[in-house]
Amino acid sequence: MPPLSPDRWRALSPSLDEALAMPADSRAAWLADIRARDAAFAADLESLLAEHEALQESLFLEGALPRILRADDVPSLEGQIVGAYRLNSRIGQGGMGSVWLAERCDGRFEGRVAVKLLNIALMGRAGEERFRREGNFLAKLTHPHIARLIDAGVAAASQPYLVLEYVNGQPIDRYCDERALGIEARIRLFLDVLEAVAHAHANLVVHRDIKPANVLVSVDGQVKLLDFGIAKLLKGDAQWGGSPVVEANALTREGGAPLTPEYAAPEQMAHGQVTTATDVYALGVLLYVLLSGQHPAGTAVSSPVTLMRAIVDVEPRRMSDVVVSRTEDADALAHHASRRDTTLGRLRRVLRGDLDTIVAKTLKKNAPERYPSVTALADDLRRFLRQEPISARPDTLRYRATRFVGRHARAVAAAAVAVLVIGGLIAFYTARLTTERDRAQREAAKAARVSETLTGLLMGADPIANRATADGLTVRGLLDAAAERVQKELVDQPEAQAEIFTVIGRMYRRLGLYDKAQLLLERALTTGRAAYGPEHASVAQTLNDLGALAAEKGDYKTAAASLESALSIRRKIYGPEHTNVADTLAELGRIYQDQGLNARAEPLHREALAIRRKALGDAHGETAVSLSDLASVLRLNGDLEGAETFLRQSLEVHRRTRGEAHAMTATTLHDVALVTAARGDVASAESLFRQAMDIHRKALGDGHPLVAVTLNSLSRILRDQGRNDEAAAALEGALAIARPALGSDHQLIAIYTINLASVHLARGEPEAAEPLLREGLRIRALAPQLVPNRRRIFPEDDWTVGATKSLLGAALTALARYGEAETVLLEARRDLDAMSPPPRPDVDANITRLVDLYIAWGKQDKAARYRALLRSSP
């Protein structure tokens, strides 16, 4: 059946659980009753049930459980080949087998993975084919917060193995504690876990072993859920027993079956029906631990017998009570609260009420009394964060009023005071209050008129929103005059001043006048916070524009912080499905993409696209922008077909809604050209680049940074065709634009200079290449981790320091400065080998340059040594 939407899955999930829980011979009549009321709903249910039954056909855990292995019982397998992977080092050992850090060795691509070698006893005699079949199915379970099961197979000697995405991170509870994350931050991190579990449930996969060790948070703050699907591959009766295992890594497990007693649901302990509600229970235990720091069973976890009794029979204590009644002394309790960035009293108050209720619902002993789906649990947590009524509480007028007051405490308090004052003094001050009210209304109307007039004037000068045909200096002069006018005339109207400064700053940014934009936007932020407070729609807009500006200047740390703040404010004000939220999601996705973090960028772009499609429709210009953003991620991930499909859709919408001469149309043409070039059609790519550049020049002016980006892209096509003179001219033009617009230290300057140096080397001009390469190295050293504007350029432009040093070594060799060349090329080799993984093409190119150096230098023995390295490289 086709993939289900989140809304459709949310509707089907409770009925699916009900069907799976009833006897098979009762389902036909039950489905017939549903079909009479909703034929489409019944058809979807039947498809899900058929798919579930197909996956349940065979069980292969036959025979006795494997004995628990100790790490020193297992001989070293280092260097052995399993499937397409070479085992490098053991990183875990458990009852199910051993876990190895490995790398792909068949030459198709490079990368590190975790290979789990399973005990042969886990497989039945007829299990190999089923294991492969289900492994292929589960390998398609892809989500940014799930550590993907890449492959599953059976190696020599019937050795079953799993290949999983390798995650370098910490268990979620340790990650939160070490960073002293507050309650809200922990819940937001937990929501990422819920997204992953909901995705798997929609694909009929239940985890059955959710626990902190299987929920890692990577060094960049990305949640990854481990071992999803392995429970399905190793399905059998859940037996709890055996000796403890050596858990050297989060990928190991307790022996026997995919079950950890501390996080098992009552039905698992009683060998009952396992459904999605089983995962809901485990998620509740995990949330209880994250928020309170203690297991729901309390001290009962110390004994298997008492733990089982606690899980099956004993209702857990409320979290808000647990945090103040632990056995530690007062200092220890205070330290425990400080690890949640609060005090003990505040911690108890935050947990009391809705959070207590939400977690208690997940931990119900009777599965049908829990949340009907993981999505329903996530919805209630988001309502808590927005201080809205949760579904787990009675929908009473008193409760709703309490939540309303919580969301609007300041306004309600002010209103209450005003009522009391007016009630007491109404007889004496009616006339005065009326006069003050009328005056305030007149002033507000005046400010609104001023704001509306000036905003309309400035939007007319927006080169992105409108096809600017006026000379760039005229537009710039208009903005300068408007800024001066607002500064003088609206000094007593800070609200209007803040909003108009934001508009002017945005226009300066789009014209490429970054210094002026920075000054105006910072002034708007200061004025807006003073006028409105820290969490206002106007403040969020200014933060959004400041983030976009910082990104274009290459300051990604500042950009991400500003956009995250804007996103937080906008979600609180507008809810999760507003177009303003989509605007910030899109900007934030571009930030991560520019840094090469495509796995973090893609879900943000998909969320923004979904919001815009729902709110604006498929034919809206902003929806087209989201299509382009998502296409850019797909292109960099190698999905050229998917990228081109989205770009063609985007281009059609831009042409229909904005016209051929619009800057956004040109930008999309540029991205289509990138895909065309990646497919090898250089002639068509060149034509598209030139079309995009002509439109950008007419719409934005000859000196806009987007023109420089397109010139750089065009140079790649020209160089690949051997047209080096034209390529050099294009790059010199790009630098002439970028240096005054971006400053001498921007990472795009490094890209353009290194590209130009490589063209000079191709033309046999090492004396021209050397200073450019040294300039590129200087800039790269300022921020080597940043890869700016990756979404708009070729992946080949991602010059590392090692690759740039290698080019410099080639230039010095050509200049017969052999001693310097040797020093630089050997440094380049060390830099490239230190990368994880080493970039093979760059490593081989550097070795080739060392061979060329030693031949030119007359050191044939060294040349032969490095030539041998080339022959032996994979």
Image (cartoon, grey):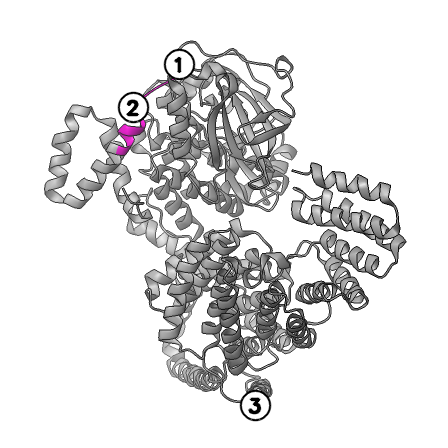
**Residue 259's x, y, as percent?**
45, 23
Is 23 contained in the magenta span? no
**Residue 829's x, y, as percent?**
77, 46
Say which residue appears at 62% left-offset and 12% top-offset.
73
- For marks 1 and 2, give the CA distance: 16 Å
The quarter of the picture where residue 18 lies is top left
Which amino acid lies under the numbered mark 2 shown in the image of this protein?
Glu
Q: What number is the disc on residue 57?
A: 2
Of badges 2 and 3, the one in the foreground is: 2
* Mark 2 element type: loop
- Quarter of the image where the N terminus is located: top left
Contact, mark 2 vs mark 3 (Cβ under 8 Å):
no
User: In terms of depth relative to the viewer, which is nearer, 836 or 177?
Assistant: 836
Say which residue appears at 40% left-offset and 74% top-offset.
425
Residue 547 seen in render:
yes
Say which residue appears at 44% left-offset and 41% top-offset.
142
Residue 92 appears left or right of 831: left
On the image, numbered disc 1 is attached to which residue?
125
Which amino acid lies under the numbered mark 3 shown in the image of this protein?
Thr
Q: What number is the disc on residue 690?
A: none
Q: Give the magenta range.
A: 51-60
Contact, mark 3 vs mark 1 (Cβ under 8 Å):
no
